[in-house]
Image: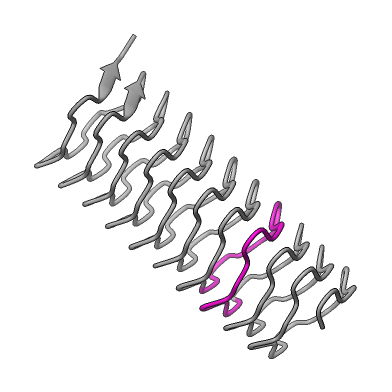
């Protein structure tokens, strides 16, 4: 189904595991509870698609457009999302452990209570993202942009935020135990009630003004 035109299609509960949907037009499609494990959906247009409760384990979504899509309770374990567009995407309570989100755009997305354990978000854009109560244990956010993002009460143990931008970021109550914040920019960030135990803040810029 490479280059398939499936705009607005009803694919509720469909088994599309290992399917080739690269470059497909799936914007506004209904893919709730669909199985897309190991599928190739790279470069596909999924803008506004409903992927709630979908199985996307090991799925290739590199450079896909998922802006304004819904992925509530979806399983994206080990998915490839390099350079994907997830701006204004709803990812409430989804599982994204070990995903590759290198250079992905997650600006203005809702990451509330998601699992990003061991995820790679190097150079990703998380500006104005809401990641409250999310799990980012062992995640890589090297050079990531978290300007004005909200990560209140997030579990960020052993996270790598080297050279990350956290301007005006709300980190109230976050757990940054063993985190690497080398050369990170934390100007005007909300650092109230944060656990910085054993964190590396070498070269980090911290200013409340």
The answer to which of 44 and 113 lies nearer the viewer is 44
The residue sitting at 67% across, 82% down in the picture is 34
* Residue 122 higher or lower than 46, as above or below: above
The reply, left or right, for residue 77 in relation to residue 209 is right
Q: Quadrant of the C terminus?
A: top left
The reply, left or right, for residue 192 in relation to residue 39 is left
- The percent coordinates of residue 17 (x first, y second) are 64, 88
- The percent coordinates of residue 129 (x first, y second) are 52, 41
- The percent coordinates of residue 29 (x first, y second) are 81, 70
Residue positioned most to the left: 198
Instruction: Please state the extent of the stretch shown in magenta in the rendering.
Output: 54-75
The residue sitting at 83% across, 79% down in the picture is 10
The reply, left or right, for residue 147 in relation to residue 182 is right
The reply, left or right, for residue 206 in relation to residue 21 is left
The residue sitting at 72% across, 76% down in the picture is 31
* Residue 89 higher or lower than 195, as above or below: below
State which quadrant residue 38 falls in.
bottom right
The residue sitting at 22% across, 24% down in the picture is 203
- The percent coordinates of residue 73 (x first, y second) are 53, 69
The answer to which of 93 and 59 lies nearer the viewer is 59
Colour mode of the rendering: one colour
User: Residue 63 lies in magenta, yes or no?
Assistant: yes
* Residue 49 higher or lower than 54, as above or below: above
Number of marks present in the image shown: 0
The answer to which of 105 and 14 lies nearer the viewer is 105
User: Residue 185 lies in magenta, yes or no?
Assistant: no
By secondary structure, the bulk of the magenta-drawn segment is best described as: loop
Q: Quadrant of the N terminus?
A: bottom right
């Amino acid at each position: 189904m490479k280059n398939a035109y499936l705009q607005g299609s009803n694919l509720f509960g469909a088994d599309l595991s290992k399917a080739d949907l690269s470059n497909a037009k799936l914007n506004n499609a209904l893919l709730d509870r669909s199985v897309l494990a190991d599928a190739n959906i790279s470069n596909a247009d999924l803008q506004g698609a409903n992927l709630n409760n979908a199985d996307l384990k090991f799925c290739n979504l590199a450079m896909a457009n998922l802006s304004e899509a819904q992925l509530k309770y979806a399983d994206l374990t080990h998915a490839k999302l390099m350079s994907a567009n997830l701006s204004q995407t709803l990812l409430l309570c989804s599982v994204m452990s070990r995903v590759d989100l290198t250079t992905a755009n997650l600006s203005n997305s809702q990451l509330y209570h998601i699992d990003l354990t061991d995820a790679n978000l190097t150079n990703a854009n998380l500006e104005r993202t809401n990641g409250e109560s999310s799990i980012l244990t062992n995640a890589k956010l090297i050079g990531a942009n978290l300007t004005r993002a909200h990560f209140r009460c997030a579990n960020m143990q052993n996270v790598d935020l080297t050279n990350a931008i956290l301007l005006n970021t709300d980190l109230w109550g976050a757990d940054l135990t063993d985190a690497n914040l080398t050369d990170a920019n934390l100007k005007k960030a909300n650092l109230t009630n944060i656990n910085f135990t054993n964190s590396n803040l070498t070269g980090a810029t911290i200013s409340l003004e």
